[in-house]
Amino acid sequence: MAKKSSSYTIFILPDPTSKPYSFSIKKKTCHCLLGALSVVVFILTGFFAQAISLLGDVTELNILRHETKGHRAKIQSVAQSVDDLKKEMARIGDLDQKLRIMTDLAPRKGGVSPLAQGGSEEPLSSLIESKLLSSKKLSEGSVVPEVTHSIEKEVLFLRKQVKEEEKSLLELMKAISAAKLRWDATPSVWPVKEGWVTSNFGKRISPFTGKLAMHNGLDIASQRGTSVFAPALGTVIRSDFDLELGNAIAIDHGYGKVTYYGHLEKQFVIVGQQVGRGEVIGLVGNTGRSTGPHLHYEVRINGDSVNPARYILN
């Protein structure tokens, strides 16, 4: 039996006419080289697989970084919107307090609007920004719950204040409505647009007796036939003739206020008629106990005569 060779002989023939070269490699050495080559190929294959995976992670990381920047911008935008809303609500609270003073409503507890209390003292946008800057990664999950909680806390605070402000505004609306009715019923304009005051409210020498006497109104001289206007909303409770005042009118404006008009040439209203501020109710005349064409104008509060000049704003 032929003996098995322990090596491999390799022949190299550069071209058909050249002398061949040959060399031998032991089988054991060849096997070792092939084994080493296999290991190298395996290692390189694993390396390339790891490299491809790493490239994928880098790509994903870049995408996450881009998304993180977008999330940060959105969070900061929401925080800034909350801050802006708080400022607007604070301005509404200040206006609320001013309206309460104007409508004679009791101020809120402590004299300060609850819109100016509570919540974070530092602007939410600044607070959120500092928290985001202090975190290395938004995706770590350590900052997101804290940031979300801060925003939710401010939003809940604003919701509570909106409900409180809604109650206050309803109260203000009722007060303003009542104030408007009272204002509409308050004499505030001249009953005649043309003329001059010849006798003021107060004590004077009576032109009829020559003695000191109380004059309960204003005498406003004007041409006969000059229009007389109602100075406020009210109901006519008198439209007749009086020996002292001649053709006279009385209007009840409510809230204890009644105005009187005397010495009229004509009356254009009847008892029970509703009249508004600025509506013509009669004409200046010289009827009754009068020394010349003029309007006698009185204002009585709860039955007591007061100076009509206090109720004329124009």
Image (cartoon, rainbow, N blue to C red):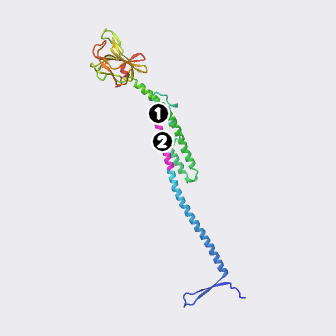
Q: Is residue 268 magenta?
A: no
Q: Using residue 215 as the reference point, say whether residue 11 is left or right of it.
A: right
Vertical arrangement, residue 226 with respect to residue 289, above or below: below
Residue type highlighted by circle 1? Asp
Tally the marks. Answer: 2
Look at mark 2 in the image and give the residue it sits on: 85
Highlighted range, magenta: 74-95
Q: What's the magenta bit mostly, secondary-structure-wise?
A: helix
The image position of residue 170, as x and y in percent, is: 48, 32
Q: Measured along the vertical axis of the image, is residue 41 above or below residue 7? A: above
Which mark, by number, is residue 96? 1
Give the Cα distance between marks 2 and 1.
Answer: 16 Å
- The reply, left or right, for residue 28 in relation to residue 164 is right
How busy is the neighbourhood of tag 2: few (under 14 within 10 Å), some, or many (20 plus)? some
Q: Position of residue 186 (x, y in %)?
A: 40, 23
Residue 145 rendering spot, x and y as whole percentages: 57, 48
Q: Residue drawn 56% across and 49% down?
A: 144
